[in-house]
Image: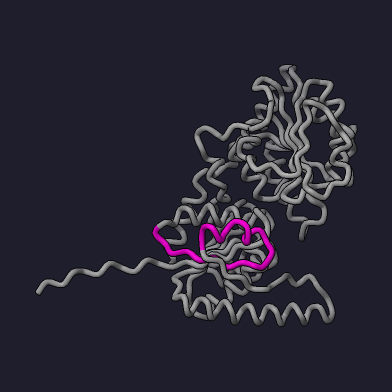
């Protein structure tokens, strides 16, 4: 009697990615490349993954937070961590997962430690030029640490296997024809986009509103993502100025914009590189370990962007920089084109494919 060969069981992967778009969007981009895997997700209550993941993958939530607290609050954090570690270990055992993929942050700690205790391989992706504390501490426990900036490698001397792959981006950024803007902006006008990250940036918004009248007078059109916590959002009105609390079509906006003013989170910079868009970068001054300045320096050092510290930047300086870059003189055009070329040199369009290949290698 002939026995049919049984098909190998589909491999199972737990993705631990939580918090902001900088952690969640790259993980989703990688997950979409792993159609041959059964994927489940590990997250934290009331974070971005709660909105984005359940329609795609089963979502498991654990209550864990960072260790920035002191005194009695630290005891509470440690108890939460111990509980989350036990929960993740149970999840990995019962689910018979073949691997864990994480994009760092505090959700990575219970995921990596639990997987290590069970002999399950771990792939960690670190998007920042200065790796976070969790990545620096846990990198020796991971089978592979993939990095978004080559500069990160110098901060991970104990990592077993460190590979530069760039940072995965949302699929819409990689379309041959980026999605058009649903805003009444002519195709032949200079467009300035301002993005303050997912929460906006009130201090930057105030500088923008001081400078914007001069830019508008010069014929520059402006799309300004303000965030939803700016009390002065309606203080400037102009037919060529579009203040929006949130704008969903960032791929279309970055491809269309001639210049972007923004923070320097790794996700924003990766998207700028894919879109080849020059930028003025104002790192968030309270980011952990000032890591946004490290990110911005990667772009500024090669002339892909200009870097300004928020405490030193005045509206007058910002006004002049934008007018110079979006001017019509041969010098302005040459400088902006050179910035675009250098920005493009930092793009890794196949980053998600590279990450998927690494996960397949170890799991």
Q: Does residue 56 sit above or below 141 in this rendering?
A: above
Residue that appears at 87% across and 33% down: 236
Residue 200 horizontal/vertical position (percent): 77, 47
Count of all numbered marks drawn on residues in the image: 0
Which quarter of the figure is the N terminus placed in?
A: bottom left
- Whether residue 218 sits left or right of residue 302 in the image: it is right
Where residue 274 sits, quadrant-wise, is: top right
- Magenta region includes residue 46: yes
The colour mode here is one colour
Q: Does residue 103 sit above or below 324 in this rendering?
A: below
Q: Does residue 230 sit above or below 343 in this rendering?
A: below
Residue that appears at 72% across and 50% down: 198
Where residue 188 sits, quadrant-wise, is: top right
Residue that appears at 67% across and 32% down: 339
Residue 132 horizontal/vertical position (percent): 69, 62
Which quarter of the figure is the C terminus placed in?
A: bottom left
Residue 280 visible? The answer is no
Q: Residue furthest left?
A: 1
Residue 133 horizontal/vertical position (percent): 70, 66
Q: Does residue 362 sit above or below 309 in this rendering?
A: below
Q: Which residues are magenta?
A: 36-57
Residue 139 visible? The answer is yes
Q: Residue furthest top?
A: 329
- Magenta region includes residue 248: no
In-front residue for pair 72/317: 72
Where residue 147 sits, quadrant-wise, is: bottom right
Residue that appears at 46% across and 51% down: 353
Residue 163 horizontal/vertical position (percent): 53, 57
In-front residue for pair 64/101: 64
């Amino acid at each position: 009697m002939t026995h049919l060969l049984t098909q190998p069981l589909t491999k199972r992967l737990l993705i631990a990615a939580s918090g902001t778009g900088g952690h969640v969007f790259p993980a989703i981009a990688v997950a979409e490349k792993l159609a041959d895997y059964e994927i489940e997700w590990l997250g934290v209550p009331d974070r971005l993954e709660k909105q984005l993941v359940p329609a795609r993958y089963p979502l498991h939530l654990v209550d864990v937070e960072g260790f920035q607290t002191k005194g009695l609050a630290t005891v509470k954090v440690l108890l939460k961590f111990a509980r989350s570690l036990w929960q993740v270990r149970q999840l990995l055992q019962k689910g018979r997962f073949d691997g864990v993929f994480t994009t760092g942050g505090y959700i990575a700690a219970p995921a990596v430690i639990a997987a290590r205790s069970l002999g399950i391989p771990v792939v960690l992706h670190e998007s920042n030029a200065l790796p976070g504390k969790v990545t620096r501490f846990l990198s020796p426990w991971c089978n592979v640490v993939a990095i978004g900036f080559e500069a990160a490698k110098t901060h991970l001397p104990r990592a077993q296997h460190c590979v530069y792959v760039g940072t995965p981006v949302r699929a819409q950024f990689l379309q041959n024809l980026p999605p058009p803007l649903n805003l009444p902006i002519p195709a032949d006008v200079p467009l300035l986009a301002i993005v303050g990250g997912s929460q906006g940036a009130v201090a930057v918004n105030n500088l923008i509103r001081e400078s914007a009248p001069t830019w508008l007078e010069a014929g520059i059109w402006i799309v300004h993502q303000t965030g939803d916590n700016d009390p002065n959002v309606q203080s400037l009105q102009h037919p060529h100025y579009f203040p929006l609390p949130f704008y969903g079509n960032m791929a279309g906006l970055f491809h269309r914009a001639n210049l972007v003013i923004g923070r320097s989170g790794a996700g924003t910079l990766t998207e700028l590189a894919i879109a080849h868009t020059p930028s003025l970068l104002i790192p968030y001054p309270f980011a952990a370990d000032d890591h946004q300045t490290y990110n911005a320096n990667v772009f500024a050092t090669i002339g892909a962007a200009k870097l300004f510290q928020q405490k030193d930047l005045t509206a007058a300086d910002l006004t002049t920089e934008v007018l110079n870059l979006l001017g019509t003189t041969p010098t302005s055009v040459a400088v902006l084109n050179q910035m675009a070329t250098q920005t493009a040199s930092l793009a890794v369009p196949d980053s998600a494919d590279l990450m998927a290949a690494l996960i397949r290698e170890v799991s």
